[in-house]
Image (cartoon, grey):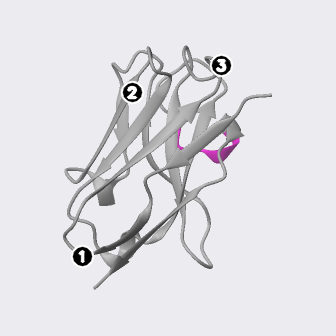
Amino acid sequence: QVELHESGGGLVQAGESLRLSCAGAARTISGFGVSWFRQASGKEREFVAGISWSGGDTDYTDSVKGRFTISRDNLKNMVHLQMRSLNPEDTAVYYCARQMRVSRPAREVDEYDFWGQGTQVTVSS
């Protein structure tokens, strides 16, 4: 059973930063692309950022480009999402997910087979 665990969420004010981490158990994400999605209350889950298995390919949704940075440490089996200049529209539950197929980061939810439980990010104005 693949286990993914997110951490680093919290309550911050607009303009502040947070760093989310996704930890995989027992080499569960080494060799796979990993992405971050988010789901705000009453909205569908949306792609935020993704990184290929090697770290050489990344993708970001337009609303976070220039503010968020995704990275990974395959030795520690972890993926991080550094979030800067947060605004209230970034408020959501953030999930990390493992991509099923080896390819560039995918934006479709159906391309991912394992998900973490999520971590809440709340940005106050």
Overall secondary structure of the magenta section: loop
Q: Residue at x 44, y 14 (%)?
A: 75
Q: Secondary structure at mark 3?
A: loop
Instruction: Give the residue type that dot 2 points to.
Output: Arg
Vertical placement of 13 versus 20: above or below?
below
Residue at the farthest right position: 1
Q: Residue beneath label 3, please? A: 26
Mark 2 or mark 3: name the one nearer the start of the chain.
3
Q: Which residue is mark 1?
A: 14
Left or right, 62 with respect to 52, comes to left
- Mark 3 packing: few (<14 Cα in 10 Å), some, or many (20+)? few
User: Which is closer to the viewer, label 1 or label 3?
Assistant: 3
Q: Earlier in the sequence, mark 2 or mark 1?
A: 1
Q: Residue at x 54, y 16 (%)?
A: 30
Tag on residue 75? none
Mark 3 residue type: Ala
Query: Which quadrant of the figure contains the C terminus?
Result: bottom left
- Asked if residue 109 lies in the magenta stretch, the reply is yes
Q: Quadrant of residue 13?
A: bottom left
Gap in Å between the C-alphas at discs 1 and 3?
36 Å
Residues in magenta, as a range? 106-110
Of the pair 70 and 59, the residue shown nearer to us: 70
Image x and y of residue 87, in percent: 28, 73
First in residue order: circle 1 vs circle 3 = 1
Marks 2, 3: nearer the viewer: 3
Kind of residue indicated by mark 1: Ala
Q: CA distance from mark 2 to mark 3?
A: 16 Å
What secondary structure is found at the residue carrying circle 2? strand
Q: Which residue is mark 2?
A: 72
